[in-house]
Image (cartoon, helix red, strand yellow):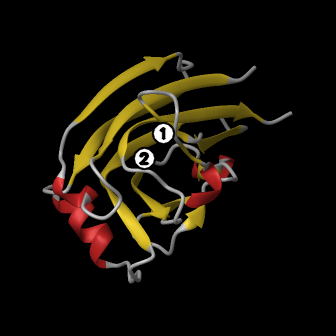
């Protein structure tokens, strides 16, 4: 049985060039977490030390935009068969007209090189059983000429899969 945690983050993207100027976000969490798992998270802003530390490890050119928000996640499970993945959906404008497709979205995991968000990112695996794992997740957009400025709604899901 899959247990899902759905994280909705309203990202303020005033425009694709100066998005780093903005610092507002509304966050809503719905959780259904099994007793064998602990999870804590909080939103990171530009001013957070862990955001800045992870960002400083990245070397990106002007065709990339690091969103001014990230996630700090702590996970632990005692279940020897549990995997936890981060799933990212398309960014959809609040007026539901414009979309930044997931194929333009990348994730930097603990300051490492960005990986495509098209595939779910493994953040906890069975070998991590009993260990408290911490993650700093930064979201990066590969800027395309057809991207429109505005406010976008992002849907992030933490998916817990129990292996057979």
Residue at the spot 46% in from the left edge and 73% down from the top edge: 112
Q: From where the camera sits, is residue 78 visible?
A: no
Q: Quick check: 101 left or right of 39? A: right
- Tell which of 138 and 37 is nearer to you: 138
Residue named by callout 2: 132
Q: Residues within 10 Å of mark 2 (few under 14, many from 20)?
A: few
Q: From where the camera sits, is residue 126 visible?
A: yes
Residue named by callout 1: 76
CA gap, disc 2 and disc 1: 5 Å
Residue 26 percent coordinates (x, y) = 27, 28
Question: Is the C-beta separation of discs 2 and 1 under 8 Å?
Answer: yes
Residue at the spot 45% in from the left edge and 29% down from the top edge: 7
**12 up-or-down from 65: above or below:** above
Q: Residues within 10 Å of mark 1 (few under 14, many from 20)?
A: many
Residue 126 percent coordinates (x, y) = 67, 47
Q: Which mark is residue 52?
A: none
Q: Quick check: 65 left or right of 3? A: left
Q: Quarter-wise, where is residue 82 in the image?
A: top right
Q: Quarter-wise, where is residue 87 in the image?
A: top right
């Amino acid at each position: 049985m899959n247990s899902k945690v759905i994280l909705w983050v309203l990202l303020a993207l005033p425009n694709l060039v100066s998005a780093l100027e903005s610092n507002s976000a509304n966050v809503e969490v719905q959780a259904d977490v099994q007793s064998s798992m602990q999870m804590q998270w909080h939103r990171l802003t530009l001013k957070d030390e862990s955001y800045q530390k992870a960002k400083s490890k990245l070397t990106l050119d002007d065709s990339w935009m690091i969103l001014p928000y990230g996630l700090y996640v702590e996970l632990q499970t005692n279940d020897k068969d549990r995997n936890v993945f981060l799933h990212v959906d398309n960014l959809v404008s609040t007026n539901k007209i414009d979309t930044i497709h997931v194929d333009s979205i990348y994730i930097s995991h603990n300051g490492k090189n960005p990986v495509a968000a098209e595939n779910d990112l493994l953040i906890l695996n069975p070998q991590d059983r009993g260990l408290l794992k911490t993650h700093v997740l930064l979201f990066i957009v590969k800027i395309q000429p057809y991207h429109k400025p505005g406010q976008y709604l992002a849907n992030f899901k933490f998916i817990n899969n129990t292996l057979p």
